[in-house]
Image: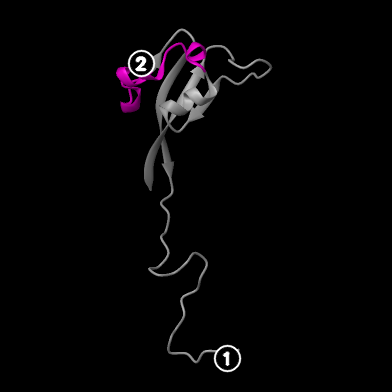
Amino acid sequence: MKKEHIYRVAFHEPPIENDERKDFFFSSLSAIYEDFTSEQIGCKVSRLWNIGVSGGTPYEGAKCKITREPLTAKSRNKPESGLISGEQKRDNNLPQEKI
């Protein structure tokens, strides 16, 4: 199994009007700022990098808490060399059909 991580942003109050969600998940620290502004988070992305959130140190601010959480994904099985996904391996010793 391959171990990866995600970033959890847990707001103290719902940040989006008419949406009760408080928890949001992102693949990178910079991705957080594509959905939320620095004002909504309470700091800029550079502060998160300086604190060490990417290394596992949580950020706890007045508006939210940001943590790095483990994400375990199943390893992918690579297809045999030279095969395209879904293509079956052929036995070259068998007679080929003529079209």
Which amino acid type is marked by label 2?
A: Arg
Q: Position of residue 51 (x, y in %)?
A: 31, 17
User: Image quadrant of residue 18?
Assistant: top right
**SS under mark 1:** loop
Residue at image position (52%, 89%) is 96
Q: Position of residue 10 (x, y in %)?
A: 50, 19
Q: Position of residue 85 (x, y in %)?
A: 49, 64
Report the front residue among 37 and 71: 37
What segment is highlighted magenta in the picture? 37-58
Give the main secondary structure of the magenta stretch.
helix
Residue at image position (38%, 39%) is 4
Left/right placement of residue 50 relative to residue 40 reads left
Q: Position of residue 70 (x, y in %)?
A: 40, 34
Mark 2 neighbour density, 10 Å: few (under 14) some (14–19) many (20 or more): few
Which amino acid type is marked by label 1?
A: Lys
**SS under mark 2:** helix
Label 1 vs label 2: CA separation? 67 Å
Depicted 96 relative to depicted 6: above or below: below
Quarter of the image with the C terminus is: bottom right
Residue at image position (47%, 66%) is 84
The residue identified by callout 1 is 98
User: Image quadrant of residue 44?
Assistant: top left
The residue identified by callout 2 is 47
Q: What is the basis of the colouring in this image?
A: one colour
Going from N to C along the chain, the mark reached first, 1 or 2, is: 2
Find out whether residue 36 is within the magenta segment.
no
Residue at image position (62%, 17%) is 16
